Image: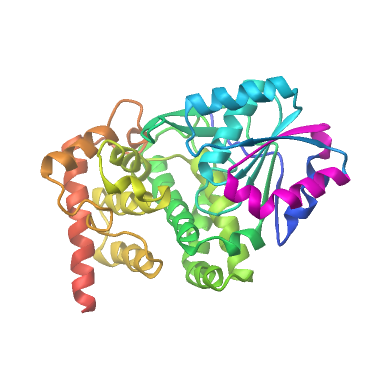
Amino acid sequence: MSERVFISPSKYVQGKNVIDRLGTYVSPFGDKALLIADDVVFKIVGQRIHDSFETEKIGIEQVDFSGEASRHEVERITKQAKEADVRFVVGVGGGKTLDTAKAVSDELTVPVVIVPTIASTDAPTSALSVIYSDAGIFESYRFYKKNPDLVLVDTKLISEAPARFFASGIADALATWVEVRSVIAFGGKTMAGGRPTIAAEAIAKRCEEVLFEHGRLAYESVQAKVVTPALEAVVEANTLLSGLGFESGGLAAAHAIHNGFTALDGDIHHLTHGEKVAFGTLVQLALEQHSQEEIERYIAFYMDLGLPVTLEDVKLKDASRDDILKVGEAATADGETIHDGFDVTAEEVADAIIAADRYSKAYQAKLK
């Protein structure tokens, strides 16, 4: 019997305006931090972080993130960090900024602190990064020996971010239980390198329950830019529950299909990670044996949040069968996560992509 493995960050902190206490939480890591963020994030929270660190007498080496979690960006920032002799790394921003911060900390062998400003993915808590080319094409997963030392989530900041990103986070998180249950049924491995634990299964299942219970209200809260109990619950589901669930429970078809989309050129690359995962989740459901009612439950939820449910929505309205097959081939490439949940061919994935599009169109037609 293979080992069961469960991994997690050392500490998770969530709350309204908690970023003003960031200095207190990071003080055990040393007296000089490498702070990675883009220009927009620095303008929003840069001064608050500086003030918080100054109170704790922590110095800051500030570096601008270029926008892509690529090998070249990691190398560039690592070089600057070594020259500055920093003691720990702080990544502030979206998923690619945070993935870059984790990679840089791994190169330096120092603690890493993750501060998401949007709840758009479940990347913050994980011991891995998704590495892209400089052009934004998926290249590989990069795995680390440990999870972040601290994940700090300010729900006030999350509430003020664009609602589209919040919806994307819900979509990414909603894939968690869909994929984990597939991995469990198939006997596949998790991102943590073992079989899913009972804890991971419970967390992944609860993640989906929270999203269906509170997701619509939380989405409305973000549109109104207010912090509510529903928002707090869904931020935790998007970030902590989904993060622990996918990493220690496993990924399957939904994320592999997301990666498969990078094989195509065009406007699809303007979609967020979660928007592509949303459609990928519908494709996974189409690969499985579910009732029409069950599949339409997901379609309706995605539509309420403005998420894509058809090929037209993911900018592939005019895609040919050959184009769709390219996605299927990339999604079933050696090493892809689909193999942890399915024994499936590229042709079968292409069929499921076309079927998911038809299922959504049929549901939309019933609403007219």
| Quadrant where the image shows the C terminus | bottom left
In the rendered view, does 128 fall on the left or right side of 305? right
Residue sitting nearer the eye, 356 or 180: 356
Q: How is the image coloured?
A: rainbow
Magenta highlight range: 27-55
Residue sitting nearer the eye, 40 or 85: 40
Q: Residue at x 68, y 52 (%)?
A: 45
Residue farthest toward the bottom in the current orientation of the protein: 368
- Residue 50 counted in the magenta span: yes
- Residue 14 counted in the magenta span: no
Q: Residue 194, position in %: x, y?
A: 50, 30
Q: Residue 323, position in %: x, y?
A: 16, 40
Residue sitting nearer the eye, 11 or 57: 57
Q: Residue 17, position in %: x, y?
A: 73, 60
Residue sitting nearer the eye, 283 or 168: 168
Residue farthest toward the left in the current orientation of the protein: 321
Q: Residue at x 22, y 42 (%)?
A: 349
Q: Residue at x 12, y 45 (%)?
A: 320
In the rendered view, does 152 fall on the left or right side of 361? right
Q: Quadrant of residue 254?
A: top left
Q: Quadrant of residue 361?
A: bottom left
Q: Residue 49, position in %: x, y?
A: 75, 48
In the rendered view, does 229 fall on the left or right side of 60? left
Q: Is the residue 106 above or below the residue 18 in the image?
A: above
Q: Is the residue 292 above or below the residue 333 in the image?
A: below
Q: Residue at x 83, y 46 (%)?
A: 24
- The answer, for residue 1, to whether it is visible in the render is no
Q: Quadrant of residue 269?
A: top left
- The answer, for residue 343, to whether it is visible in the render is yes
Secondary structure character of the magenta stretch overall: helix
